[in-house]
Image: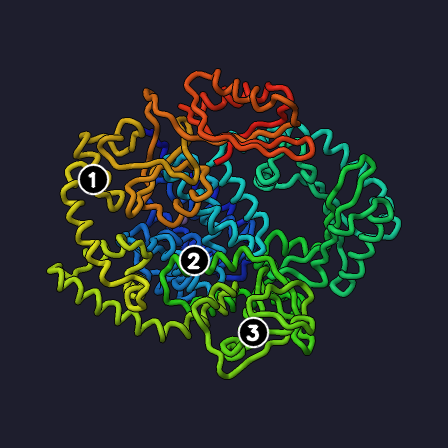
Amino acid sequence: MIRVDVEEERKEILKRYRRLLRVAKPLLKSGDAKLIKRAFNVSSEAHKEMRRKSGEPYIYHPLEVALICVEEIGLGTTSIIAALLHDVVEDTDMELEDIERDFGPKVAQIIDGLTKISGVFEYGSSQQAENFRKMLITLSDDVRVILIKLADRLNNMRTLESMPRHKQLKIASETKYLYAPLAHRLGLYSFKSELEDLHLKFTDKETYEFIINKIDETKVSRNKFIKTFIAPIQVELDAQNFKFNIKGRPKSIFSIYSKMKKQNIPFEEVYDLFAIRIIIDTPLENEKADCWQVYSIVTDFYRPNPDRLRDWISTPRANGYESLHTTVMSQTGQWVEVQIRTQRMDDIAERGYAAHWKYKEKENSPEKAAGGLDEWITQVRTLLENNDGSAIEFMDDFRGNLFQDEVFVFTPKGDLKVLPFGATALDFAFEIHSEVGANCIGAKVNQKLVPIGHKLKNGDQVEILTSKKQKPSEDWLKSVVTSRARAKIKDALKEEKKQYILDGKEIVQRKLKQMKMEFSSVVVEQLRAFFETKTTTEFYYKVGRGIIDPTSIKGFKEFKQQKKLKKNTMIQVTDESSFTKEIKNLKGPEHDQLLIGEDMDVVDYILAKCCNPIPGDDVFGFVTVNEGIKIHRTSCPNALELLSNHGNRVIKARWTSQQEIAFLAGLKIVGTDRVGLISDLTKVISNELKVNMRSITVDSDSGIFEGTIKLYVHSTNHLDNLIENLSEVQGVLKVSRFD
Ligand code: MN
């Protein structure tokens, strides 16, 4: 039991509320403070009886979210009110109408977008995807929904410690999968970095803390280096009367982690641990010239790498990011990234959309400020209007748009078009006009004839060739990357498809009748799973088009009969709750966690091949449609997708200690080649107790040896031991585990 000092708590709540008001003060117009006070009172009254998992009063959460909105995004009164009330409709008796009556339609609309839909979980749909889609529909009306949602998520991530482990994993994965890219796309870089760092903290705490310690340890020498590096630049900037500010900041923990992982290098070898940022204060009309002047000063002292010059001032990124980046060689032979930008650009880089707004109003120059972001919102709107597929499909499309890097191409008349990286001639055609897209037969890129699937490069000039006889086909979807083109092609195909689906449904009905089986949603769902299609519609379609042979439906009947016979030995699991029920039936209450090893005989589960978990790994169970439960490592490349899209199918799992089952693991060995190396390696392996080698492949190229070994081990301890012994073999440089 937690003892609570009510009086103390009340004081603390008021203290936090006053802090919010103080920070918001410069943004408030007359009468605003009164509205905020009312929202605060309504919210604290509504959440009065509630506490967060940490035991703290619930009202801390909306107060913090509101504070993030003001302090870190720069949002105003409407957003503060919406943030204070954002959980009220979902968690308490208050209705949306109450909010609308008391705070007006704008606030009500934002809160509606923020409130999750409650519903029953089904196959082929995903609760989270639906929620996300709903949120984005509101985005087309008001981008503040997204910004408040991000603030909400940030506070939840900051306070994730008190959540149970499986919830931590689910929330952290969702954050990495959706919210961090979303923050990035909106230009909220500090949000994005913090969300990614927190994701790492809750999925791989050990590495997270390791990197933090390393950054700390190297701080003194880094600061010394930065000081020497910037000294001559400072002198010259002063001499030329620049108003400036220079920062040398380490990169985010997550970006260091990604570098280490991607390049498979230790912390010490990550060379661009930090970037130098020169922020100048200069009027709008001089921005570009002054930034290049600073560039000129920097490169007078240090030689730049011509491949690493990035000019996002002449052509800002789609999320509004503007900056001039160069990488130069320092006196000590180390490459250093230098970012040059103005105060305005820096504000936009840190605070994204909200800062855009601010400058848009101030400078009264809509073209400059609106640019890519408005375009992006328009894109999302098109996507929403054209999409009537499943929410998961929609989210994939949307994510596609989030991660894009851009290519810049030109029309024959020289108009600039910005397309996502990997865009093709066909994407370009649809970008021009949907009719041009639908009739596209090819293109001329820089005067040369190319097919519709030709990938465009920066600076290409593209002319589309059309024919009235041309019409979109299914494989066109493989040739496009933009959601606009996909949507248009799907529209055209849909008409055609509809007929196939109707035909397919009729055939299935007829077949089932012939086999004296009932045509019901349960049977159809089983058929869908049997034929391994994603949705029932797709199943009908495949039958209608003859991709699935109607006579093979008979095979399903036989399969079902066999299954009935086996039923006593195998549990049919359909979702988490029925799983938990089954487990409880079998093992009595208090047992909602899958014990790998022990439950082997009662529950049908297998170890996922994508990540080959072994005892000791952090794992979770995932209910699949046809193959029972699969066990994945939490670090599995597929884990993010599974946890965030299908959280309801995730089952807690842990290893039992007493077992002697062998598990497949892979090792990669790099070293300098010499005679007898392989035999030495295999000797170590066969000397190790109870290790069985399954395969070994070796590549040797000009003296460098690279081998992969697959073997059966019992646990991570066991494997670590083996790695250590292998590392000691003469000539071996590195031994690492791979999935
Ligand atoms: Mn919340």
Q: Does dot 1 land on a helix, a strand or a loop?
A: loop
List the single residue furthest toward the left. 516
Taking depth in this image into account, of 487 and 571 the one nearest to the observer is 571
Q: What residue is disc 3 on?
A: 429
Corner quadrant of residue 536: bottom left
Which quadrant holds residue 324? bottom right
Q: Is mark 3 within 8 Å of ligand 1?
A: no
For residue 571, the mark is 1
**Foreground of the two, 517 or 579:** 517
Which amino acid does the dot numbered 3 rest on?
Ala
Disc 1 under 8 Å from ligand 1? The reply is no
**Discs 1/2, front:** 1
Instruction: Describe residue 46's horizontal placement relative to residue 147 as left or right.
Output: left
Q: Exactly how many numbered labels are in the figure?
A: 3
- Whether the residues at callouts 2 and 3 have beta carbons within 8 Å, the answer is no
**Which residue was labeled with disc 2?**
395
